[in-house]
Amino acid sequence: MLLEVRDLQVEFRTRDGVSRAVNGVSYGVAEGETLAVLGESGSGKSVTAQAVMGILDSPPGRIAGGQVLFRGRDLLTLKENERRRVRGAEIAMIFQDALSALNPVLSVGAQLAEMYTVHRGLKRKEARAKAVELMERVGIPAAAERVGDYPHQFSGGMRQRIMIAMALALEPALIIADEPTTALDVTVQAQVMELLARLRDETGMALILITHDLGVVADVADRIAVMYAGRIVETAPVHDIYRAPAHPYTRGLLDSVPRLDQKGHELYAIKGLPPNLQRIPAGCAFHPRCPIARDVCRTDVPPLYEVGPGRRSACHFWPETLAGAAGANSTGGAGGAGGAGEPGDGGTSAGPAPGPAPGPGTGPGTGGGEEAGGRD
């Protein structure tokens, strides 16, 4: 495993108390693999990435526990000068707001060239030539003419390509892309995702894709980790998630995706709001919004049950959700609230499962090690 996050815990101290933004997150990504980390705003997916990169604002943020192992070395134990040698060269990050991330008073060429002068010791002329090569590689037209332009002179999609070029500059083994398609139109979103997938295939790098949008990960990700209010609630290969989600929250996200084959169908929305991280409900944090919640859900935090090969779900009643999804897909019915199928197949969503729900002990339990946390 290239990167392993183990039982990571991050908290923020505020005037109103302590928010546990990341509460026991564990996940891993292998060489050449793409892991999508999915969740609503406030789920902790971006904070987890910041902790991995060593760029967490502290104070008020604080890593309260856990490990971040990169090629077997715990990054959390490194001194800041050692972390700087890892950032960019071995792990790079693409931020969601390219206009804010880029320096407005420096040309994009100067910012790209700086990667080579600082980290590789190249002379300015050589570094500028490398910057042009990078811009061409990520598909910026007339790169040699535009290398002297400033960030505001590029469109949103082109600025995001500049950010991708900066991440690629030092040929890292892992790139973390934090909402890389935010505020881009659908066509440009697809182009950016295609670019990331192509570069991953060309370089063999691993990719962690942080997003709230299931639509952008279907054809790119190998696995998905779904986060909610401080925990990972489901992990599975991408096709299994789309075919038959094993957690009600995942299914709700899928049902909320607009479908071209369901004209006139009311778009589903998960009721309620994510919880306040300082007042997370007892038991399963999703139970106030869950359509199948029982009494046990209000008192007992569910572990991550093993629900199939490479699949885990933090739901006491995962067989009900899984059986309902499989049943709806096999009959072609669009039960439940909306529609969710496999990537690219236009499949239908899961309907509610028939019959009584199994007890919370059903299925092999795994404990709470692969959980996630908190604030976006």
Image (cartoon, rainbow, N blue to C red):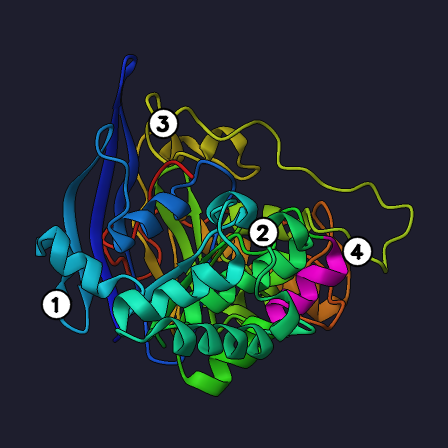
Q: Is residue 187 magenta?
A: yes
Mark 3 / mark 4, whichever is N-terminal: 4
- Spot the residue most to the bottom: 202
Q: Residues within 10 Å of mark 3 (few under 14, many from 20)?
A: many
Mark 1 / mark 2, whichever is N-terminal: 1
Name which residue lies at 48% across and 78% down.
Answer: 129
- Element marked by disc 2: helix
Residue 259's disc number: 4
Q: Which amino acid type corresponds to the residue marked 1 in the rendered image?
A: Arg
Estimate the x, y position of residue 244 in percent, counting from the top left: 57, 64
Q: Which amino acid type corresponds to the residue marked 2 in the rendered image?
A: Pro
Q: Nearer the viewer, residue 98 or 11?
A: 98
Q: Nearer the viewer, residue 8 or 351?
A: 8
Mark 4 / mark 2, whichever is N-terminal: 2
Depicted 204 relative to depicted 110: above or below = below
Depicted 135 relative to depicted 7: above or below = below
- Element marked by disc 3: loop
Estimate the x, y position of residue 155 in percent, counting from the top left: 69, 54
Estimate the x, y position of residue 347 in percent, counting from the top left: 73, 67
Quick check: can you spot residue 33?
no
Q: Is residue 361 magenta?
A: no
Which residue does the numbered mark 2 point to in the structure image?
A: 151
Q: Which amino acid type corresponds to the residue marked 3 in the rendered image?
A: Leu
Q: Residues within 10 Å of mark 4 (few under 14, many from 20)?
A: some
Q: Residues within 10 Å of mark 2 (few under 14, many from 20)?
A: many
**On the image, which quarter does residue 193 sit in?**
bottom right
- Element marked by disc 1: strand
Name which residue lies at 66% across and 58% down.
Answer: 157
